[in-house]
Amino acid sequence: MSKTILITGASSGIGKATALYFQQKGWNVIATMRSPEKAAELSELENVHLERLDVLDLESIHQAIQNGIRKFGKIDALVNNAGYGAYGPLETFPRENIIRQFNTNVIGLMDVTRSIIPHFRQKKDGVIVNISSIGGKMTFALGSLYHGTKFAVEGISESLHYEMSQIGVKVKIVEPGFIATDFGGRSFDFQAGEIEDYQPIINALMKQWQNPNNTVSPASLVAEVIYTAVTDDTNQLRYRAGEDAHSLLDNRKKMTDAEFFSMMKNQLGM
């Protein structure tokens, strides 16, 4: 019997690439997103089932999981991929934007996970893959909201490992580096604000983003790493994705906080 994976945020980027990769590997794929009617390419593929799932809507989460189980009989793996990045000075963010960032990237991830655990517990088997980021282990300027959510994903996932090991479920974290996705478009919330004191660092960061020195990896590379995490049948917790993920995280581990801040500020001309 073919195995089945449920992926959140599968309309584009890493989520879509992962859906395509697992389908090519012979898996049944429950590709979930807020607007499945827009996913024409995925809808035409064999053994790919589209479901509406908004991580901010608990009923849609429950419905997507139940519909997926009815369609394929069971779910073997979950990829919590839905999310976006909020960047800008903390002072400039309206409170509702702050809440939305954490509700989407953290609470939504936990709601989807909580909703599928009973199914995994009943089977005494399953894999939960949470998509973090190198930004869950190190930080860049103006990312207090985004990095806060990804640091949370790291801690949630690591602690969840203990209880899930009691019911035969594996927990994995995938940490992509800079990926060629639409993260800077619809998956991005940038608040520049009008406070003059922050404009130099905002301008410096925008210039850096427009001319990145880092190696950008395709979303398909992350999909391959996710596939390894799901199928390697090990208790390995963390998986880096992208050449820059390895180099940046290795360099960060070698530096003191003061050395790291000095390097980053120097890159921004601060």
Image (cartoon, helix red, strand yellow):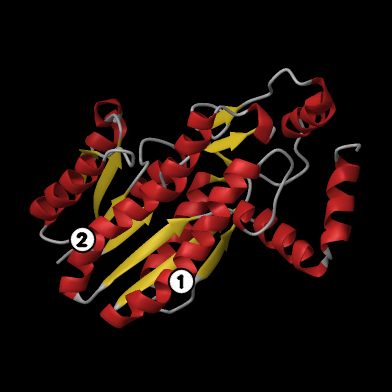
Q: Residue 243, image x and y in percent?
A: 67, 57
Residue 88 image label: none
Please state which amino acid type lies under the numbered disc 2: Ile
Please state which amino acid type lies under the numbered disc 1: Ser
Q: Residue at x 52, y 64 (%)?
A: 155
Q: Tell me if mark 1 has few (under 14), some (14-19) or many (20+) residues whose alpha carbon lies within 10 angstroms of its own.
A: few
Q: Is residue 96 visible?
A: yes
Picture quadrant where residue 56 is located: top left
Q: Residue 213, image x and y in percent?
A: 78, 42
Between marks 1 and 2 in the image, the one whose residue lies nearer the viewer: 1
| Residue of label 2 | 75
Q: Is residue 22 visible?
A: no
The quarter of the rendered structure image containing the N terminus is bottom left
Picture quadrant where residue 122 is located: bottom left
Q: Residue 61, image x and y in percent?
A: 24, 45
Toward the viewer: 60 or 37? 60
Q: Is residue 85 left or right of residue 115?
A: right
| Residue of label 1 | 159
In the image, residue 241 sits, relative to residue 43, either above or below, namely: below
Number of marks drawn: 2
Point out the residue furthest to the top here.
194
In the image, residue 78 sits, relative to residue 89, either above or below, namely: below
Q: Residue at x 47, y 37 (%)?
A: 99
Picture quadrant where residue 194 is located: top right
